[in-house]
Image (cartoon, helix red, strand yellow):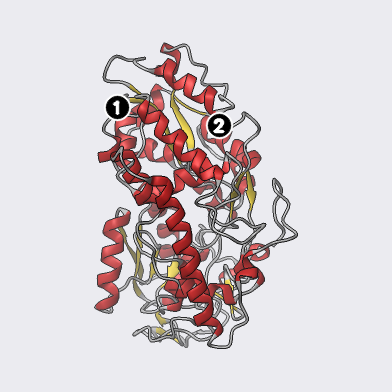
Amino acid sequence: MSRSTTASAAGTISRRRLIGAAFATAGGTVAAPWLTGCTGSQEPGQGVASGGGETTGAVTWWDQFRPLTTLFEEELFAPFTAAHPGVTVERREMDGPSMGQALQLGRRSNQLPDVHSLAGLDGSPASLVGAGWFQPIDEFVDVEGSPVGELLLDGIHRFDGRVYTVPVFSSRWHDAIPWLNTELCERADVDPETSPGSWDAFRAALQQLRGAGGDDVHPMVIGAKDPSYLASLLNRLAQTAGAAGAVDPRTGEYAYASEPYLQAMEWLLSLQTDGLLHPSSASMDTRDARARWAAGEAAVYPWGPWFIGGLKVQEPEAVERGVGVWHIPTVDGSDPVLYSEPPGGTFWVSSQAQRAQLGAELMLRLVDPEFQRSLASAMDQPPVLTEVVADAEVHPTYRTNVEYMAADVRMAPVPQVRNPAVSAVLAEMGEVTPGLGQIVQAALTDGSSDWRSALTTFAEQMTAERERAIESVAGDGAEVGVEDWRFEDWTPGEDHQQ
């Protein structure tokens, strides 16, 4: 995610160059010191900043955060435009697939927005950076001096000495949180306050929830139409069985065919075999599944921390009826230990941005402590300044969940922080299909699926593709190898010091 010079509007850059990401947040009508542009200032009366594009007119902004619509409009955009006469913000909110298509079309026609998220785009941030999608923001704003300056990492936010993105949300979370319909739990005499510790205890609770509200109510629903959801779900379940992630930090090898992944797949499939999953799960994406859960068709929905924020906006009656949360269960009932990488970027300044300086300033307002507190109140992904959650206006269940995730999630080692050339390898790697989510999807919909062989093949193909990419990047003079994915100093169950 980095490069040393700003991309041109055409975005012509070597695929293996490390470019960067522009991301940030905050609120308030008075600009904080870190919002002062480092360069790109303009003479009075001029409408163009050096390298920054126009500094009046409409800043275009695309994202997928529907639950944050009011917050963005009232506490991010309105104060910003009040402090910048002649400036407006034009926001476009889309679901992930639609946004991905719109971004691809916009790039081909040179009509990308000034700021956008990565929703719906295929490939890693490194590959998008390498393809010239973004430009650095540190010439427009003082990111190093912002409230998140100490959280910036080489290989994640900073590339070739340039800052492209900042963390707005915390990464101490996971996306397999068991969210509960407490009304159905109480009918079935299931305690919503006590998490079932083991997989067996969780299964027993689901069996107890069967038919709690009649034949049309099911114990659990999943968004099985979405391969990315299924991939995340299996990754998290495998971690509760002892996996450290898709790549084992001890060996540097892909872990998709390891025992924890096999156990996780067997357990997930057993829930379906036992009739504990909503029978229409295969036809639901994540929003469909949430709507069915909110309508009372299921008691449990494993999803991310933003679940309750989405309910508050789209199905507020479900929040009033009762929402609970459990720790994710583990294979043996021990305390959960899951791993996430340090927080990266959510929003980026496009290489085609007409108002890059304004976009960077607007983004950096997202990390202002007051806006972070307001961000917590939206009950989406926890803000990067997690301490603000303690006195934010949030549902008690959301605060409990943030506490659970703080206890359960550890920071994983990141190879590109140690060796920036790893980002070039990730950018070079092509997509391997069928992917993990597609393998899970096939197993759930086809009883004859040989998913064990498919997981083994997938791990082998990922290994081969990484080896090809390493050889290609090393051929350009970079010093990089499989050993960069191995961490002898990694201690399971602890945060890794990057």
Residue kind at label 2, given as amino acid type: Pro
Q: Mark 1 vs mark 2: which is more N-terminal?
A: 1
Q: Nearer the viewer, mark 1 or mark 2?
A: 2
In this rendering, the answer to whether 149 lies above or below 75 is below
Residue 33 appearing in the image = no
| Left or right: 172 as drawn, with respect to 319 | right
Q: Where residue 378 sits: x, y (%)?
A: 46, 43
Q: Is residue 426 visible?
A: yes
Specify the quadrant that holds the C terminus: bottom right
Is 459 located above or below residue 189 in the figure? below
Query: Callout 2: helix, strand or loop?
Result: loop
The quarter holding residue 496 reads bottom right
On the image, numbered disc 2 is attached to which residue?
329
Distance from the alpha carbon under mark 1 to that under mark 2:
25 Å
Helix, strand or loop under label 1: loop
| Residue at screen point 46% across, 75% down | 428
Query: Percent from the top left, x then y, of residue 403?
Result: 62, 37
User: Mark 1 = which residue?
Assistant: 295
